[in-house]
C-alpha cells in the first residue's frame, strides 16, 4: 500500500517537473524570437539630436494675429464678457519649444519636422556627446512637415535611409528622440498600418503624405526623430500622434522615408520643394461604381471632374475614369493619388493605368507643377489643403441673386457644420459668414488666404448674419 502511494506521488512530481521544464524551454524559445535593440541603439544613437528653438511672440497672445481695428475687437470682447487687460500692450516675450532630429551627412545636415522649427528665431542643436551648435534652416516644407537644417561641424555620425517598399505590417520598429526633453529616449513597437491617410484636421496638411502607423510610444518632443527598422535604417520620420490627452495612446504616425528623401534632396539642391500636379477632382470608388464598371473590389480613384487647361485634360483624361495605377504604383483609394502625384517631379512623364467604359487603358501624363496652379484651380479640384475641414464647416460662395436678395456685398454661406471647431463656435447651416479675424470674406480663395495665417491659440472674431441679424461669434482653432 505504501509502495503504491509513493509511486503515485513520484508520478505526480514527475509531471510537475515536466511541466516546469516545458514552460522554461518555451519561455527561452520565445525570448530567442524577441528582438534585442541594444546594438541598434549603440550604433544609431550618436546621430540623433535634440532640437531646441527660441522664438519671439509680440503682445498679449490672446490677440495675436488680429487684423481688424481696435473698436471692432472691443465690441467682440464685450459681447463675450471680456475687456482689455489694463496692462495690454504690444510688448515682446520669448518662447521655446523642443523636438528631435537626425544627422544624414558628416558635414552637418539634419532632418527634422517643419512644425518643430517653424517660426524659430534661433535653433540650438545638442548632439549625443552634449556639444551644442546653432543651426541654420536650409529649407522647410509645410506640406510634408519636413525641414532640413545644418550645423557647422565635420566628421559627424550619420544614419542611413532604408527602403519604404520593404516595410511590412507587424514588423518591429524603434524610435529615438527627446520626449518631454528626456534626450535620447528609446521606444519600440510594431508597424500597425502602411499607407495611412489622415484627415487634414489632424495633420494640418493635404494628402501629400501616406503615413506609417505604429504603436510606438511617441510623445511630445519625439517629433522630427527617426523611426528605425531592425537593420538600423531610417524608414520614417516621427511626425504625428493621435491622442485625447497629449500623451501616447499607441497611435503614432511617421512620414515614410521615400517622401523624406524626395523632400530632403530638393531642399538640399534649391531650398524649395516642387510637387507634381494632375488637375483632376477625385473620390473613392463606391461598391455601386465597382459593380457598374466590373471591378472585383471598390478600389482606385474615381475621376469626378477634369480641370480645363490642366495636365490631365491635355493627356486625355475624362470624367468617370477610374485610376488604378500611377507610374506603376497601385492606387488603392482616392487618398493614394495625391501622394504619388506629389512625389513626381513637374515636367516628368508617367504612365497611368485606368478603367474607362469597362476597358483597361494606359495614358501617358506630362506632370504639371502644383505651385504653378492658381489658388482657384486648386480650390476647384480640392488640391489645396482643405481649410474648410480645419474650420469644421463647409461653405460656398453667394450668387449675385442671393447677395441682392440679402442686401449683402460679400459673404460665404455655411452649407454644413462638419467639425468641433465650428460647432463649439455655435455656427449653424445657413449662416452667412461676413468676416473672419477682421477681414471680409468675398470668395473661397479669399478664405484660403486668410485661413493660412490664422493663429491657433487665440480667439478669432467671426461676423455672422443669421435671420437678418448680424452678430459676432468666437472661433478657436485646435492648436
Image (spheres, rainbow, N blue to C red):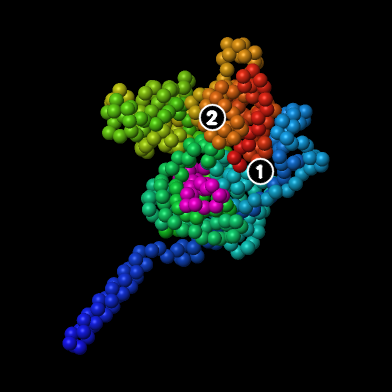
Q: Give the range drawn in magenta.
A: 239-263
Percent x, y of residue 240: 52, 46
Percent x, y of residue 321: 36, 25
Left or right? Give the position of 62 relative to 258.
right
Q: Which quadrant would residue 288 be assigned to in this image? A: top left
Farthest residue in the right direction? 86
The quadrant the C terminus occupies is top right
Magenta stretch holds residue 287: no
Q: Is residue 35 above or below residue 202?
A: below
Nearest the viewer among 314 and 304 is 304
Left or right? Give the position of 113 relative to 280.
right
Determine the secondary structure under disc 1.
loop
| Residue for point 42% across, 37% down | 336
Near mark 1 (Cα within 10 A), the count class, few <14, some 14-19 or many ≥20, is few
Q: What separation in Å lies between label 2 and label 1 (alpha carbons)?
A: 31 Å
Nearest the viewer among 281 and 390 is 390
Q: Can residue 453 be spotted in the picture?
A: no
Where does label 1 land, which residue?
119
Near mark 2 (Cα within 10 A), the count class, few <14, some 14-19 or many ≥20, is many
Where does label 2 land, which residue?
417
The quadrant the N terminus occupies is bottom left
Q: Which quadrant would residue 420 be assigned to in this image? A: top right
Magenta stretch holds residue 254: yes
Percent x, y of residue 91: 79, 42
| Residue for point 30% across, 34% down | 297
Percent x, y of residue 163: 41, 50
Q: Can residue 246 be spotted in the picture?
A: yes
Farthest residue in the bottom direction? 2
Amino acid at each position: 500500500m505504501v509502495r503504491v502511494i509513493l509511486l503515485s506521488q513520484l508520478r505526480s512530481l514527475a509531471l510537475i517537473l515536466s511541466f516546469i521544464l516545458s514552460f522554461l524551454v518555451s519561455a527561452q524559445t520565445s525570448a530567442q524570437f524577441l528582438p534585442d535593440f541594444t546594438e541598434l541603439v549603440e550604433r544609431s544613437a550618436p546621430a540623433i539630436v535634440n532640437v531646441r528653438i527660441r522664438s519671439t511672440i509680440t503682445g498679449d497672445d490672446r490677440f495675436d494675429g488680429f487684423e481688424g481695428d481696435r473698436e471692432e475687437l472691443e465690441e467682440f470682447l464685450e459681447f463675450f464678457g471680456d475687456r482689455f487687460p489694463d496692462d495690454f500692450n504690444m510688448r515682446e516675450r520669448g518662447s521655446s519649444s523642443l523636438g528631435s532630429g537626425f544627422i544624414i551627412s558628416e558635414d552637418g545636415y539634419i532632418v527634422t519636422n517643419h512644425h518643430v522649427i517653424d517660426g524659430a528665431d534661433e535653433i540650438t542643436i545638442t548632439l549625443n556627446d552634449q556639444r551644442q551648435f546653432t543651426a541654420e534652416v536650409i529649407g522647410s516644407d509645410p506640406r510634408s512637415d519636413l525641414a532640413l537644417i545644418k550645423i557647422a561641424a565635420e566628421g559627424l555620425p550619420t544614419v542611413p535611409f532604408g527602403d519604404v517598399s520593404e516595410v511590412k505590417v507587424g514588423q518591429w520598429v524603434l524610435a529615438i528622440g527627446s520626449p518631454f526633453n528626456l534626450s535620447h529616449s528609446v521606444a519600440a513597437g510594431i508597424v500597425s498600418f502602411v499607407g495611412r491617410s489622415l484627415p487634414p484636421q489632424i495633420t494640418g496638411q493635404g494628402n501629400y503624405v501616406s503615413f506609417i502607423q505604429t504603436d510606438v510610444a511617441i510623445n511630445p518632443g519625439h517629433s522630427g526623430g527617426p523611426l528605425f527598422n531592425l537593420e538600423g535604417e531610417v524608414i520614417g520620420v516621427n511626425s504625428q500622434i493621435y491622442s485625447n490627452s497629449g500623451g501616447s495612446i499607441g497611435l503614432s504616425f511617421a512620414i515614410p522615408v521615400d517622401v523624406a528623401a524626395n523632400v530632403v534632396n530638393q531642399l538640399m539642391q534649391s531650398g524649395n520643394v516642387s510637387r507634381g500636379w494632375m488637375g483632376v477632382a477625385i473620390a473613392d470608388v463606391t461598391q455601386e461604381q465597382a459593380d457598374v464598371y466590373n471591378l472585383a473590389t471598390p478600389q482606385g480613384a474615381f475621376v469626378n471632374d477634369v480641370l480645363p487647361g490642366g495636365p490631365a485634360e491635355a493627356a486625355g483624361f475624362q470624367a468617370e475614369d477610374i485610376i488604378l495605377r500611377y507610374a506603376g504604383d497601385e492606387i488603392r483609394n482616392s487618398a493614394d493619388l495625391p501622394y504619388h502625384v506629389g512625389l513626381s517631379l513637374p515636367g516628368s512623364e508617367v504612365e497611368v493605368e485606368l478603367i474607362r467604359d469597362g476597358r483597361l487603358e494606359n495614358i501617358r501624363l506630362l506632370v504639371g507643377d502644383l505651385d504653378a496652379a492658381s489658388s482657384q484651380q486648386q480650390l476647384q479640384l480640392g488640391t489645396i489643403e482643405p481649410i474648410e475641414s480645419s474650420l469644421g464647416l463647409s461653405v460656398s460662395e453667394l450668387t449675385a441673386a442671393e447677395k441682392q436678395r440679402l442686401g449683402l456685398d460679400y459673404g460665404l454661406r455655411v452649407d454644413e457644420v462638419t467639425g468641433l471647431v465650428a460647432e463649439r463656435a455655435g455656427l449653424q447651416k445657413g449662416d452667412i459668414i461676413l468676416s473672419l479675424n477682421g477681414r471680409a470674406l468675398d470668395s473661397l480663395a479669399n478664405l484660403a488666404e486668410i485661413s493660412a495665417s490664422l493663429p491657433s491659440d487665440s480667439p478669432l472674431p467671426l461676423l455672422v448674419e443669421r435671420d437678418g441679424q448680424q452678430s459676432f461669434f468666437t472661433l478657436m482653432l485646435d492648436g
